[in-house]
Each structure stands twice: as C-alpha cells, then as structure tokens.
Amino acid sequence: MENACRAGTTTRFSYGNDTGYSQLGSYAWNKDNSPSKAHSVGEKLPNAWGLHDMHGNVWEWCLDRYGDYTGGSV
C-alpha cells in the first residue's frame, strides 16, 4: 500500500516533501478542507501512477486507540 501511495518516490508524499503541507489540499481531503464527510473518488489530483485518494479521505475516519496499550496480549 505504501509503495502505491508513494508511486515509487522516496519523498514524504508522492508529490514531494511538502513540509508545510501547502500542496496537500490538491491531493487529499483532510481535516482542513473537508466537512467530515466522504468524497467521491478522483476529485483530487492523482499521484504519478494515476492513483487517486492515496492520502486522506475516508482512511481518516478509522478509529483506533492512539498510544501505548497497557494490557496484555491483544
């Protein structure tokens, strides 16, 4: 999945390092440009391999505990 997302690049995102996230809105729906809803596939720019929505959109809805697990095995 990561290889497809990066489209063969070694940068932080498939479209470059974008340390200030200035280009992110062109490639992904995220908390800053989406009113908490799913969007149709392909509304943002694709990566170099022609894949859309590899950053953001619905994956950001996944609920998971963030932090160390304190119990035994899961």
Image (tube, grey):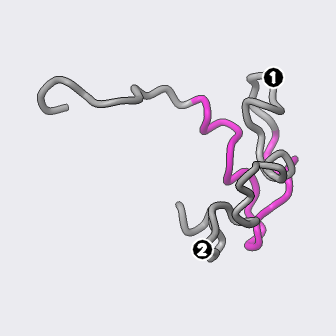
- Please identify the residue farthest to the bottom as the structure is shown: 8
Dot 1 crowding, Cα within 10 Å, few <14, some 14–19, many 20+: few
Dot 2 crowding, Cα within 10 Å, few <14, some 14–19, many 20+: few
Residue 13, given in percent of the width and then of the height, sits at 67, 61
Q: Secondary structure at mark 2?
A: loop
Q: Looking at the picture, which amino acid does disc 2 mark?
A: Thr
Name which residue lies at 83% across and 50% down.
Answer: 22
Name which residue lies at 25% across and 28% down.
Answer: 69
In the shown orientation, is residue 41 left or right of residue 3?
Answer: right
Q: Residue 57 in magenta?
A: yes
Q: Which residue is mark 2?
A: 10
Q: Give the CA distance from mark 2 to mark 1.
A: 31 Å
Residue 61, given in percent of the width and then of the height, sits at 60, 29
Q: Looking at the picture, which amino acid does disc 1 mark?
A: Pro
In the shown orientation, is residue 71 left or right of residue 27?
Answer: left
Q: Secondary structure at mark 1?
A: loop
In the shown orientation, is residue 40 left or right of residue 60?
Answer: right
Q: Which residue is mark 1?
A: 35
